[in-house]
Amino acid sequence: MSRAWPVDGIAPEASLAINARRILAVRIAEFYSYASIVSIETATEELHNLLIATKRLRYTLEMFRSVFQEVGEQQIERVKAMQEELGNLHDADVRIALILDELAELGVEQTVELGKALALTPVSAHQAITVTALRPRPDDPRRGVVALLGREYVARKHAYDAFFVLWQRGQQDGLRRALVGLSSTPLAGEAVASTTD
């Protein structure tokens, strides 16, 4: 899991709005630092890290709802939709890993059984045993597990495609510009700090 980027410059004497914008700016930068991997469907670990960065961005927007108001609410919904699809993608990745582990374990067990069978039978029966091993029986548990694995890869593909569409839509609809606008401009009713003393 990726560590959260640190937020520098938080000042207890500064307004909530100023500190909220500083935090949001870092969360936006962290989120978009993964932009280069978005089109790499097989970047499992990086896409998981993007999921975490997306959660941080969303929760920052939610925590400071009173600061970011209606514009912030709109961005929460957009980020939340991406988070949900990235979550579906990660869930599929976790299930795929579990299924692959199960297949590997079944393979080891069946290989050990094959070795025992070959060791205990005359050489003349070896060909029949190996041919049988190459054609799984109808009750072989690997059949169901392999079918489940195929379904999980389909679910993963759907989740990735749905996320990618949302990412592309965000790029076209100015999500980044809207987020940066929230993090860099004084909000309605906020006093602008004077630069002179």
Image (cartoon, rainbow, N blue to C red):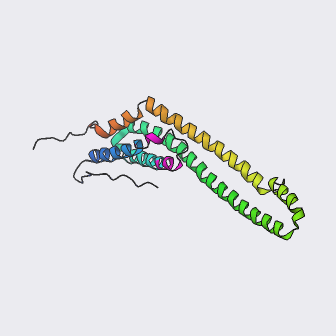
* Quarter-of-image position of residue 192: top left
Report the side of 16 relative to 113 (left or right): left
The answer to whether one can see residue 158 in this image is yes
Where does the image place residue 19, in percent across and percent down from the top left?
28, 48
Where does the image place residue 132, in percent across and percent down from the top left?
85, 56
Report the side of 170 relative to 103 (left or right): left
Residue 46 within the magenta-colored segment of the rendering? yes
Farthest-out residue, bottom = 120
Who's the residue at 50% across and 46% down the image?
A: 47
Judge by depth and name the residue closer to the eye, 111 or 57.
111
In this picture, which residue range is highlighted in magenta? 33-49
Residue 180 within the magenta-colored segment of the rendering? no
The answer to whether one can see residue 76 in this image is no
Against 135, is 118 above or below? below
Judge by depth and name the residue closer to the eye, 108 or 75.
108
Against 187, is 104 above or below? below
Who's the residue at 59% across and 53% down the image?
A: 94
* Quarter-of-image position of residue 110: bottom right
Query: How many numbered dots are placed on residues in this image?
Result: 0
Farthest-out residue, front = 123
Where does the image place residue 136, in percent across and percent down from the top left?
81, 54
Where does the image place residue 168, in percent across and percent down from the top left?
48, 33
Report the side of 17 relative to 176 (left or right): left
Judge by depth and name the residue closer to the eye, 175 or 128.
128
Farthest-out residue, left = 197
Q: Name the quadrant of the C terminus.
A: top left
Who's the residue at 45% across and 33% down the image?
A: 170
